[in-house]
């Protein structure tokens, strides 16, 4: 399945577009990966100005191709993220954070990913980790940086709660690389930039979803290209995903919304350079069903 990106406004504050492939009406998840956004590249100096907002039931994984971003959150973190490093925030029962592009750090080009937490991990206290010096493998002319799980004989040190994999693959023009993968995993090949095909041509910023079964993925680049390989065991739970919350029932996300909008200490508090907080929107008029 090839999913073309749809354009979504990052925030009303900046009006900058992001390109979203997951969730999609025909595909909600790849393993535990449940949200995939591409941002930029853009030279707009105030492009990423995302004020305080909440999360429940998930991990956010932020990956930069270029530029730098300052992350702040309600567990006391102040962290500047650089390309090649990973910010991994575990919301657990509830956390709030903000993200701000650092001025004069070049064009901002980023990938924002969410990982759904399994039931046994989703009520834990929130925490945050920044990972540097992630394992890098030179493979058939490509450079592969593994930021989650295991691939090509190396394992990332990142703390995750389900069987998954995530890697950035940089290919030179006219290169073909075959990557052995776990056949019990389903996978997504996301084109960050370039002209890429697997068994089919993938549009730029699009993703090719590959169901479990194959033991390898072959990627061909016509131009210098960057792709993300995301995969994992099929997620064995149905979830309710609405706005920034993941729960199991409509009532859970309704409660999270009410608590955030009322200033409940479930999400903590912190001070940043942006100021303000993003209120949760109105819920739909229908009951949200687990999917």
Image (spheres, grey):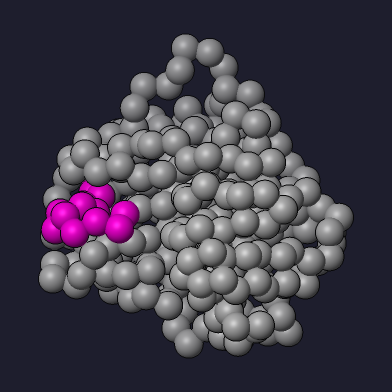
Q: How many discs appear?
A: 0
In the rendered image, the quadrant that contains the C terminus is top right
Task: Give x and y (percent) for residue 73.
Answer: 32, 61
**Residue at 56% across / 85% down in the picture?**
136
Q: Report the side of 82 relative to 199 (left or right).
A: left
**Residue at 71% across / 65% down in the picture?**
218
Q: Report the side of 7 relative to 175 (left or right).
A: left
Task: Give x and y (percent) for residue 92.
Answer: 53, 54
Q: Quadrant of residue 42?
A: bottom left
- Residue 49 included in the magenta stretch of the image: yes
**Residue at 65% across / 37% down in the picture?**
27
Q: Quadrant of residue 112?
A: bottom left
Task: Give x and y (percent) for residue 181.
Answer: 77, 68
Residue 160 higher or lower than 10, as above or below: below
Residues 49 and 141: in front is 141
Residue lying furthest top in this view?
285
**Residue at 47% across / 50% down in the picture?**
205
Q: Report the side of 24 relative to 98 (left or right).
A: right
Residue 17 higher or lower than 63, as above or below: above
Residue 15 higher or lower than 59, as above or below: above
Would residue 170 be seen by someone viewing this image from the given angle? no
Task: Give x and y (percent) for residue 100.
Answer: 22, 59
Q: Report the side of 82 relative to 102 (left or right).
A: right
Residues 56 and 291: in front is 291
In the rendered image, the quadrant that contains the N terminus is top right
Residues 152 and 85: in front is 152
- Residue 53 included in the magenta stretch of the image: no
Would residue 37 be seen by someone viewing this image from the given angle? yes
Magenta residue span: 40-51
Residue 175 higher or lower than 101, as above or below: below
């Amino acid at each position: 399945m090839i999913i073309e990106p749809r354009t979504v406004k990052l925030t009303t504050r900046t009006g900058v577009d992001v390109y979203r492939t997951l969730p999609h009406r025909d595909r909600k998840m790849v393993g535990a990966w449940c949200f995939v956004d591409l941002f930029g590249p853009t030279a707009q100096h105030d492009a990423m100005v995302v004020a305080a907002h909440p999360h429940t039931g998930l991990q956010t994984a932020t990956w930069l191709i270029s530029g730098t971003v300052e992350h702040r959150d309600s567990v006391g973190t102040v962290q500047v993220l650089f390309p090649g490093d990973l910010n991994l925030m575990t919301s657990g029962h509830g956390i709030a954070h903000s993200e701000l592009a650092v001025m004069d750090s070049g064009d901002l080009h980023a990938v924002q990913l969410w990982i759904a937490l399994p039931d046994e991990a989703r009520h834990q206290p929130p925490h945050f980790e920044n990972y540097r010096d992630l394992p890098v493998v030179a493979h058939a002319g490509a450079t592969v940086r593994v930021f989650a799980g295991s691939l090509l004989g190396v394992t990332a040190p990142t703390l995750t709660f389900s069987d998954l994999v995530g890697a950035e693959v940089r290919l030179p023009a006219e290169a073909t690389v075959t990557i052995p993968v776990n056949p019990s995993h389903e996978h997504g090949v996301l084109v960050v930039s370039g002209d890429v095909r697997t068994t089919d041509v993938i549009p730029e910023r699009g993703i090719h979803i590959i169901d479990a079964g194959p033991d390898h993925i072959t990627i061909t680049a016509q131009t210098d290209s960057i792709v993300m390989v995301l995969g994992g065991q099929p997620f064995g739970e149905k979830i309710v995903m609405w706005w920034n919350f993941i729960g199991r029932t409509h009532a859970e996300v309704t409660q999270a919304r009410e608590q955030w909008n009322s200033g409940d200490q479930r999400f903590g508090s912190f001070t940043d350079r942006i100021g303000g907080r993003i209120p949760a929107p109105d819920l739909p008029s229908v009951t949200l069903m687990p999917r």
